[in-house]
Image: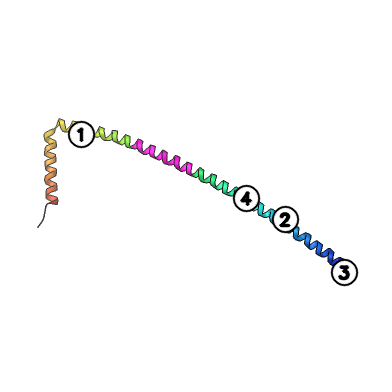
């Protein structure tokens, strides 16, 4: 009879241990699910932050490029005005220079047979 009682106690202990393990597994599953939601939320926030930084950087780059274009236009307009002034001051010299350059290019790139 002692053996039978011992077997019942042993079976009850195993059953109790099995239930405790099942409960721990359920708790672990819930923890893992919560962790997965937390990681997904963090990743989404990090992605938004990266996207916003990229957008700000591109806007800054575009603004700098537009500023450089404006400065270049101003510089080119100044150079154009300066060149026009020189040509108006000495039109014959510039005409002779242009004719000489045309002749030189004609000789260099002329057809050879």
Q: Position of residue 90 (x, y in %)?
A: 14, 32
Q: Is mark 4 on a helix, strand or loop?
A: helix
Q: In this view, does 3 lie to the left or right of 104?
A: right
Query: Which disc, if any, is residue 74?
Result: none
Query: Which disc, if any, is residue 23?
Result: 2
Is tag 1's residue or tag 3's residue first in the polypeptide sequence? 3
Image quadrant holding the N terminus, namely bottom right
Question: Foreground residue, 66 or 9?
Answer: 9
Tag nearer the camera, 1 or 3: 3
Q: Residue furthest right?
A: 1
Q: Give the range drawn in magenta.
A: 51-68
Is tag 3's residue or tag 4's residue first in the polypeptide sequence? 3
Question: Are there few (<14), some (14-19), or many (20+) residues within 10 Å of tag 4?
Answer: few
Q: How far apart are marks 1 and 4 (CA)?
A: 71 Å
**Dominant secondary structure of the residues highlighted in magenta in the image:** helix
Contact, mark 1 vs mark 4 (Cβ under 8 Å): no
Query: Which disc, if any, is residue 83?
Result: 1
Query: Which disc, if any, is residue 3?
Result: 3
Query: To which residue does mark 4 refer?
Result: 35
Q: Is mark 3 on a helix, strand or loop?
A: helix
Q: Where is residue 102 in the image (x, y as percent from the top left)?
A: 13, 44
Q: How far apart are marks 3 and 4 (CA)?
A: 47 Å
Instruction: Identify the image quadrant of residue 3.
Output: bottom right
Looking at the image, which residue is at 63% across and 52% down? 33
Is tag 1's residue or tag 4's residue first in the polypeptide sequence? 4
């Amino acid at each position: 009879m002692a053996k039978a009682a011992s077997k019942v106690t042993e079976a009850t202990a195993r059953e109790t241990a099995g239930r405790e393990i099942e409960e721990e597994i359920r708790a672990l599953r819930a923890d893992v699910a919560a962790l997965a939601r937390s990681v997904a939320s963090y990743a989404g926030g990090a992605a938004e932050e990266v996207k916003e930084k990229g957008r700000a950087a591109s806007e800054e780059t575009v603004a700098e490029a537009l500023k450089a274009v404006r400065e270049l236009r101003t510089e080119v307009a100044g150079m154009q005005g300066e060149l026009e002034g020189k040509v108006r001051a000495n039109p014959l010299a510039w005409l002779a220079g242009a004719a000489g350059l045309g002749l030189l290019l004609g000789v260099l790139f002329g057809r050879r047979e």
